[in-house]
C-alpha cells in the first residue's frame, strides 16, 4: 500500500516526527485497537473513520469547532489568513486552534491550505450549509437578476456586462461580515426561508411562504441580493450560507472562559477526599459481601430494579444514589456478575478485597472515569428505566471527563461546570439536561474522593494524568501514584459484655466472614456494630464452626479477654447443638429381608451408599430414577412407588436441552501502546510487511463485494469475521434507512454476512455492499 496523493492526510502523518506521532496516537487510542493500521495510509483511514472522528470531537472545545467549520466553509481556499478574515480574529489565534486540530488528527496543512478528513469536512460543510459559489451560480442567471442582486448589495452596476457583474457580485458576497449583518436584519419568515435554502430543503411551490400581505420570502431574499433565480428555481450561493452561519454567532471565537481558582485549604481537601474514598470502598465491599451471602435480585431483562435497590439501601444503610453508584462501579470494574440466581461477586472480587486500599480505589475510579453514562443520573429510554448495571447510550461520560480535565490546576469546579458548553460543545443535551449531568459528575466525584471543596483533589489530578499518559496498565499506574494518599487503616474489633462487637476500619475477609456467620449487623458506617445472638451462633455451628474454634478466632480478633457473657452464650448454644439429628434421604428401598440382605452385599450397588434403617428398609441419598437404573443393571426388577405406596407408571419421553442462541460478548480487543504502534509505522510506513489482515482471503472477498469501504475498514471487518469479534457498522437497508449496529460476523454467504446483531438480539444477514462504515466495537 502506497501513499498516494501529494499533500494527502497519509503523507502529512508520515511526515510527523516521533514526538508528534506519539502524541497523536495517545489521544486517539481507538486506532491502536487490533488489527492496527498497517502503514500511514491505513492510519489516515482509521483516523478518518466515523466513530473515530466522533470520539475525537468529544474532546474538542467550542473555538476549535468554529474554526473547523470555517475551514469546511472555505473549502480549497481555507488558509489561516482566510479563516482569520472570515472570523475577524487575529491570525495567531486561528493558527493556535488549527495546531490543536492537527494535534488531534482532525486537520492538516498542505501548501498553506488547511484540510480536513473527508467525512469531517462533509459533516461540518452540512452544518454550514449552502450550495455552489456565486461565480458558478451566475452562469445560469439572467443579467437583469444579477444586476438587481449586485445593486442591492451596493455595487455600482452601470455599464457592467455579465462577467463584470459576476465578479463584482462575488466580491460583495465575499465580505462575510457585511453580508452577515444583512442576514441578521431579515424578518423571521425570510430568515426561516433562507435557512431552508441554506440546508437544501427549499422547494419552489407556488405561493410558498406568502404572507397575508402577499410578501414572498424568496423575492425578499432576492431583493436584498441574497438569493438568485436559476432556471425557475431559487438558489442560495455558498457565500451567503457562510455569512448566515456567521450571523448565528454573536462572537465567533471567545477564547477559554476565565476560570477563577478554587479557594480551599489543601489539608481540608485531602482529609475530605480520603474520608469519601474510604466510605465508597466500604460501601462497595459491603454490597459485594452481601451479594456473596445472598445474590442481588435481577429483573428478567437484567439489571437491579428499584424495589431491590430500595431493599439494599435499607439493609446496608446506604443512600439511594450510593447504591446506584456501587452497583455500576462494581460491575464496570469486573467485580459483580450475573448468574441464574442474580448478581454475585466475580472470581476477581477476592483478590480485589485483599488488595491495598489504593489499588481497590484505583480499580473503581478508573472504571468510573471510562463509563459512558452517569450512574446517579441514568437516562430513561422511552418511558422505561434501564436499571443498573445495564449499559446505556449517554453523553454523560463525555461531560464527566471534560469537566475533570478542565478543572485541572486548581480551577473552581463549579465555574467549569457553568461553562461546560464551551469545553464540551458536542455533548448533545438540551436545556437543563447538561446541568444535571454536570451535577451528577460532581456528586460522584465527591463520593469517590476525586473532587472536594470545589476543586480537583490530588487523587483526581493523578487520575487525569494517568488517563492522558495512557499506560499499559492504568489501574496499577494509578495505584502507584496514589499509594501515599491512602494510608492503611487497620481493622480493630472491640468485643463488649453486652454481646456486641464494635468494628472500625475495613474488616478483612476473615473478620467479615466470622462476623457474618455468628452475629447480626445493627449499624454500618465508619464504625459498625454487630450483635451476637443464639440464632447466629447456631448458624455458625451449622456452618462448620465448633465452640472452641469460634472462641479461639474471636480471641484473636480482640485485644482484650473475651467477655464472659459471650463465652457463656457460645457454650450454651454448643451444648444443645446436635442433640437432635436429621439424616438426608432421597430414596427408600422396600423389600423382604432376604432381598434387602442381597442388595446390601451386591458389589455393583455400593455407589448408591445404601443404609439399612430396618430389616426391610434401605435408604439412599440418590434420586429415585438413578436407584432404579442401578438396581435394574444389577439384575433386580424394582418398581417405583409414590409417597402413598402406589406404583408409578413410568412416562417415557425424550429430553432436549434448550438451545443457546445468544453468544457471550466478545472479549475486549487487544490494544497496542502508542510507542509500539509508532515504532511499527515508522519501520514500515507503507504497510508492505508480508502477512496481516490486509493480505487474507477474507479481506479480498470483502473488498470485491464492497468497493467504498477503506482498506482499514475492510481489515477490521475481515478480522471480526475470521476471529468472531464484534464490530460497529453503519448499515443502509434496502429502503435506504441507516442504522448503527454492533454485530459479530459469523459466515460469509455469497453477498451476505450472517451475523449476530446485538441491537436485535438475534441472527441477522447484512448485505456487504450496504455496509457504509466499520469501527472497532
Image (cartoon, grey):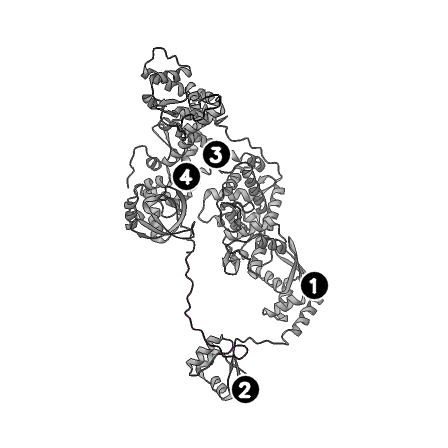
In space, the residues marked 4 and 2 are separated at their CA atoms by 82 Å
Which disc is residue 61 wearing? 3
In space, the residues marked 1 and 3 are separated at their CA atoms by 61 Å
In space, the residues marked 2 and 3 are separated at their CA atoms by 88 Å
Among the two numbered marks 2 and 3 on one chain, the one whose residue lies closer to the N terminus: 3
At numbered mark 3, what does the secondary structure look like: helix, strand or loop? loop
Considering the whole magenta stretch, tell me its main secondary structure. loop
Residue topped by disc 2: 615
User: Residue 78, how many percent across, how many down?
Assistant: 38, 27
Q: Nearer the viewer, mark 2 or mark 1?
A: 2
User: Which of 61 and 493 lies nearest the eye of the viewer?
Assistant: 61
| Visible residue check, residue 84 | no
* Circle 2 Cα neighbour tier, 10 Å, few/some/many (<14 / 14–19 / ≥20): few
* Circle 3 Cα neighbour tier, 10 Å, few/some/many (<14 / 14–19 / ≥20): many
Residue topped by disc 1: 499
Tell me whether the residue at label 4 lies in contact with that at label 1, contact meaning CB atoms closer than 8 angstroms.
no
Among the two numbered marks 4 and 3 on one chain, the one whose residue lies closer to the N terminus: 4
Give the magenta part as a residue range: 641-663
| Visible residue check, residue 232 | yes
Among the two numbered marks 4 and 2 on one chain, the one whose residue lies closer to the N terminus: 4
Which disc is residue 181 wearing? none
At numbered mark 1, what does the secondary structure look like: helix, strand or loop? loop
User: Which of 386 and 357 lies nearest the eye of the viewer?
Assistant: 386
**Residue name at image x 42 percent, y 37 percent:** 104
Residue topped by disc 4: 53
User: Which of 516 and 351 lies nearest the eye of the viewer?
Assistant: 516
Amino acid at each position: 500500500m502506497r501513499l498516494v496523493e501529494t499533500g494527502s492526510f497519509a503523507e502529512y502523518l508520515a511526515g510527523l516526527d516521533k514526538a508528534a506521532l506519539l502524541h497523536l496516537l495517545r489521544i486517539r487510542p481507538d486506532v491502536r485497537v487490533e488489527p492496527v493500521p498497517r502503514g500511514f495510509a491505513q492510519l489516515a483511514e482509521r483516523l478518518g473513520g466515523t466513530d473515530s472522528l466522533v470520539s475525537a470531537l468529544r474532546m474538542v472545545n467550542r473555538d476549535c469547532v468554529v474554526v473547523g467549520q470555517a475551514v469546511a466553509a472555505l473549502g480549497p481556499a481555507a488558509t489561516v489568513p482566510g479563516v482569520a478574515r472570515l472570523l475577524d480574529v487575529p491570525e495567531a489565534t486561528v493558527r493556535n486552534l488549527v495546531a490543536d486540530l492537527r494535534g488531534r488528527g482532525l486537520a492538516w496543512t498542505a501548501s498553506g491550505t488547511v484540510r480536513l478528513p473527508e467525512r469531517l469536512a462533509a459533516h461540518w460543510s452540512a452544518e454550514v450549509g449552502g450550495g455552489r459559489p456565486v461565480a458558478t451560480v451566475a452562469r445560469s442567471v439572467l443579467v437583469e437578476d444579477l444586476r438587481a442582486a449586485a445593486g442591492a448589495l451596493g455595487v455600482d452596476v452601470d455599464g457592467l456586462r455579465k462577467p463584470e457583474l459576476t465578479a463584482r457580485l462575488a466580491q460583495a458576497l465575499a465580505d462575510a461580515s457585511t453580508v452577515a449583518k444583512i442576514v441578521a436584519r431579515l424578518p423571521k419568515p425570510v430568515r426561516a426561508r433562507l435557512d431552508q435554502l441554506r440546508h437544501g430543503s427549499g422547494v419552489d411551490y407556488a405561493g410558498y411562504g406568502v404572507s397575508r400581505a402577499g410578501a414572498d420570502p424568496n423575492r425578499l431574499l432576492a431583493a436584498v441580493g441574497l438569493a438568485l433565480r436559476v432556471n425557475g428555481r431559487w438558489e442560495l450561493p455558498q457565500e451567503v450560507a457562510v455569512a448566515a452561519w456567521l450571523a448565528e454567532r454573536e462572537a465567533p471565537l471567545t477564547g477559554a472562559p476565565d476560570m477563577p481558582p478554587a479557594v480551599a485549604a489543601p489539608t481540608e481537601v485531602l482529609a475530605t477526599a480520603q474520608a469519601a474514598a474510604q466510605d465508597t470502598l466500604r460501601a462497595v465491599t459491603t454490597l459485594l459481601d452481601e451479594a456473596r451471602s445472598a445474590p442481588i435480585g435481577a429483573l428478567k431483562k437484567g439489571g437491579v430494579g428499584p424495589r431491590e435497590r430500595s431493599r439494599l439501601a435499607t439493609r446496608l444503610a446506604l443512600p439511594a444514589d450510593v447504591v446506584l453508584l456501587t452497583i455500576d462501579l462494581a460491575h464496570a470494574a469486573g467485580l459483580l456478575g450475573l448468574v441464574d440466581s442474580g448478581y454475585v461477586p466475580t472470581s476477581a472480587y477476592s483478590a480485589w478485597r485483599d488488595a491495598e486500599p489504593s489499588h481497590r480505589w484505583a480499580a473503581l475510579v478508573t472504571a468510573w472515569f471510562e463509563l459512558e453514562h452517569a450512574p446517579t443520573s441514568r437516562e430513561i429510554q422511552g418511558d422505561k428505566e434501564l436499571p443498573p448495571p445495564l449499559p446505556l447510550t449517554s453523553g454523560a461520560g463525555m461531560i464527566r471527563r471534560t469537566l475533570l480535565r478542565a478543572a485541572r490546576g486548581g480551577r473552581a469546579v463549579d465555574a467549569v461546570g457553568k461553562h461546560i458548553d464551551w469545553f464540551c460543545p458536542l455533548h448533545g443535551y438540551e436545556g437543563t439536561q447538561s446541568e444535571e449531568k454536570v451535577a451528577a459528575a460532581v456528586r460522584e466525584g465527591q463520593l469517590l474522593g476525586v473532587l472536594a471543596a470545589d476543586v480537583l483533589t490530588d487523587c483526581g489530578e493523578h487520575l487525569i494524568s494517568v488517563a492522558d499518559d495512557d499506560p499499559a496498565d492504568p489501574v496499577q499506574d494509578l495505584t502507584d501514584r496514589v499509594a501515599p494518599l491512602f494510608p492503611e487503616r487497620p481493622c480493630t474489633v472491640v468485643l463488649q459484655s453486652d454481646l456486641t462487637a464494635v468494628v472500625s476500619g475495613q474488616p478483612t475477609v476473615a473478620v467479615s466472614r466470622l462476623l457474618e456467620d455468628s452475629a447480626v449487623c445493627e449499624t454500618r458506617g465508619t464504625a459498625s456494630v454487630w450483635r451476637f445472638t443464639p440464632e447466629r451462633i447456631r448458624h455458625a455451628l451449622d456452618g462448620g464452626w465448633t465452640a472452641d474454634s469460634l472462641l479461639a478466632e474471636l480471641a484473636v480478633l480482640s485485644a482484650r479477654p473475651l467477655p464472659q457473657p459471650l463465652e457463656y452464650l457460645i457454650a450454651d448454644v454448643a451444648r444443645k447443638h446436635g442433640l437432635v439429628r436429621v439424616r438426608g434421604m432421597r430414596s427408600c428401598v422396600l423389600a423382604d429381608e432376604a432381598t434387602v440382605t442381597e442388595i446390601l452385599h451386591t458389589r455393583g450397588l455400593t455407589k448408591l451408599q445404601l443404609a439399612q434403617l430396618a430389616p426391610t428398609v434401605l435408604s439412599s441419598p440418590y434420586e429415585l430414577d438413578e436407584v432404579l437404573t442401578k438396581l435394574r443393571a444389577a439384575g433386580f426388577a424394582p418398581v417405583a412407588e409414590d409417597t402413598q405406596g402406589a406404583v408409578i407408571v413410568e412416562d417415557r419421553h425424550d429430553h432436549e436441552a434448550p438451545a443457546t442462541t445468544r453468544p457471550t460478548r466478545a472479549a475486549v480487543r487487544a490494544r497496542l501502546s502508542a510507542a509500539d504502534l509508532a515504532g511499527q509505522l515508522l519501520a514500515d510506513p507503507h504497510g508492505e510487511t508480508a502477512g496481516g489482515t490486509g493480505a487474507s482471503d477474507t479481506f479480498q472477498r470483502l473488498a470485491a463485494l464492497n468497493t467504498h469501504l477503506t482498506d482499514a475498514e475492510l481489515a477490521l471487518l475481515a478480522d471480526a469475521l475470521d476471529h468472531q469479534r464484534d464490530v460497529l457498522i453503519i448499515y443502509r437497508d434496502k429502503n435506504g434507512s441507516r442504522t448503527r449496529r454492533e454485530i459479530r460476523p459469523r459466515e460469509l454467504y455469497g453477498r451476505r454476512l450472517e451475523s449476530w446483531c446485538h441491537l436485535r438480539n438475534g441472527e441477522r444477514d447484512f448485505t456487504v455492499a450496504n455496509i457504509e462504515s466499520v469501527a472497532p466495537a
